[in-house]
Image (spheres, helix red, strand yellow):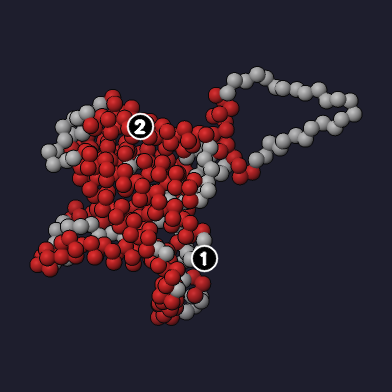
Amino acid sequence: MAAVGSGGSTATAGPGAVSAGALEPGTSSAGNVKHLVLFLHEAVLVQYMDTLKLAVPSLIYTLQNNLQYVAISNLPAATFQVTYQLKILTTALFSVLMLNRSLSRLQWASLLLLFTGVAIVQAQQAGGGGPRPLDQNPGVGLAAVVASCLSSGFAGVYFEKILKGSSGSVWLRNLQLGLFGTALGLVGLWWAEGTAVAHRGFFFGYTPAVWGVVLNQAFGGLLVAVVVKYADNILKGFATSLSIVLSTVASIRLFGFHVDPLFALGAGLVIGAVYLYSLPRGAAKAIASASAPTSGPCTHQQPPGQPPPPQLSSHHGDLSTEPFLPKSVLVK
């Protein structure tokens, strides 16, 4: 059965009151519902041109969700988790092309490190790294992961551009994404499995494990909102690294996944790349200055009668704490 998902709910995050401006303190519950309905009617239906902008990322997110199922069906969970970090590379490239962002040298180096690590993991997988089910096709899995990362990067940056170019809240945009994603998913489901759904019912095959996956995806989407609001990129990098480790451990315990030195090297490079990419500018400059040769303080003799050169302030403000990639909805 084709996977049905809105995609946007797991790709976006951020607090926002959908109808806080339309509600007045002390109104009844019925009044609140009425205001909410009126607000949604105005925002979704009356301003339909604004809503239609979300059709593009919603279509891509729906496609991305299904590509992930194809990928995880053809790759070990640990390999998929490592390879899927290519979304950082694709997101960064689309950010440079579409949002005119600039990346530091350390960021470019970390992206190269990331690509190298993924390439090593895929080489290990192609070399037969341990037993795998006969129905798995690593080539198909890799193609699905790459397509999913490309779609994730483009849709995320496109969605961020929409958010920054309009006054709609993130929650409203999530609702619009969900509407399009659900409609597109249902169309795809009916096209692929319409006869089976008509005979067996919509919820046929929804085992407890399937419900667990659904709830986990929804809960993960809410967690992204919490991460974007309360955490920074360093903590998010640690969370990504921890997810790779946990996926590897779970694969070993549940599926007999074999960790060889080549996989460990590739996964280590990916984890290191994620950490370096998430470093704030101040920390990155400290690393760069520590690696540069020191020659002691440089003193310049001023000609008589000339004022001393202006001294640079040691306070750099936001420069010391601003992340390379600002908190954003585009990297998940």
**Front residue (pair 205, 44):** 44
The residue under label 2 is: 117
**Front residue (pair 111, 308):** 111
> What is the secondary structure assignment of the residue under circle 1?
loop
Q: In the image, is 206 to the left or to the right of 119?
A: left
**Residue at coordinates 87% horizontally, 30% vertically from top-left?**
306
Disc 2 crowd rating (10 Å Cα; few below 14, some 14-19, many 20+) is many
**Front residue (pair 192, 329):** 192
**Any part of residue 259 in sight:** no
**Residue at coordinates 31% horizontally, 43% vertically from top-left?**
146
Q: Residue furthest left?
A: 199
In the rendered image, residue 241, in percent from the top left (x then y), is placed at 37, 38
The residue under label 1 is: 167
**Residue at coordinates 35% horizontally, 46% vertically from top-left?**
149
Q: In this view, does 153 lie above or below 163?
A: above
**Residue at coordinates 19% horizontally, 63% vertically from top-left?**
191
Amino acid type assigned to the residue bearing label 2 in the image = Gly
Of labels 2 and 1, earlier in sequence is 2
